[in-house]
Image: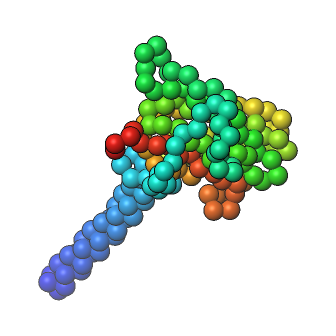
Amino acid sequence: MELNKTKEFIAIIIGVVIVVLVILGFVFGWFSGMNTARNGGSLTKSAVPAGTVAPSVGATSTPKGVAVPTVVTPAAPGATTQLRVFNISADKGVFTPSTVIANEGDTVHINFTAVDKTYDITVPDFGLKQTAAKGETKVLEFGATQSGKFTYYCASCGNSATSPNGYIIIVPPQGS
C-alpha cells in the first residue's frame, strides 16, 4: 500500500514538473519572439538593394515612389552625417512617396500627413509609430543607426502585408 502511494506521489511530481517546464518554455519562447529586434534580430529588415544611393534635394532621376528630400544639411558643424527631411502622405490607402532613402548615420525627419482619414506610420525595427488624424501632419524623426531595407506600414489599417506600406532604406557607408 505504501509503495503505491509513493509511486502516485512521484507521478504527480513528475507531471507538475512537466507542466511547469512546458509553460515556462511557452512563456520564454513567446517573449523572445516578441523581442526579436532587441535581441539583435529584425522584424522587417532585408538587404539594401545594390546600387542604392540617397537622393539629394531637387534630384530628378529618382525611381518612381522614392521620396526626394526637401532639406539635406550637415547634422552638426563639421559633421559628415546629414539631416534629411522628407514629406510622406497617406491617402486612399497608399503612402506617397512610399520609399525613403538615407545614409547610415543620418538623422531622418519625416513630415507625415494623413489626407483622407487617420493613418499611422509604424517602423518596427526602429521602435517607431506616429499617428496622424485626417488633415494632420505629424513628425517622425530618428537616427539611421543601422543599414538595411526596412518595411514600414499602417498598423491601425492592418498588418505589413495587408495595409499601406513602404520602405526606409538606410545605405551603409561606402566600402562596407
Give the vertical position of 11 relative to 162 (above or below). Answer: below
Give the vertical position of 156 relative to 127 (above or below). Answer: below
Give the vertical position of 26 relative to 141 (above or below). Answer: below
Residue at point 58% right, 38% down? 55
Residue at point 68% right, 62% down? 162
The image quadrant where one finds the N terminus is: bottom left
The image quadrant where one finds the C terminus is: top left
Q: Is 46 placed left or right of 16 in the picture?
A: right
Q: Residue furthest top?
A: 77
- Give the number of marks: 0
**Between residues 63 and 126, which one lies in front from this camera angle?**
63
**Between residues 10 and 53, which one lies in front from this camera angle?**
53
- Where is residue 31 shown, x and y percent of the image? 41, 54
Residue 130 location, quadrant: top right
Give the vertical position of 159 relative to 134 (above or below). Answer: below
Residue at point 27% right, 68% down? 17
- Where is residue 22 shown, x and y percent of the image? 34, 68
Q: Residue furthest front?
A: 61
Residue 28 location, quadrant: bottom left
- Where is residue 173 shown, x and y percent of the image? 39, 39
Residue at point 15% right, 81% down? 2
Q: Residue furthest left?
A: 3
- Where is residue 76 shown, x and y percent of the image? 47, 17
**Between residues 21 and 82, which one lies in front from this camera angle?**
82
Q: Is 161 placed left or right of 38 in the picture?
A: right
Asked whether residue 128 is in view, the answer is no
Asked whether residue 90 is in view, the answer is yes
Q: Is 176 placed left or right of 4 in the picture?
A: right
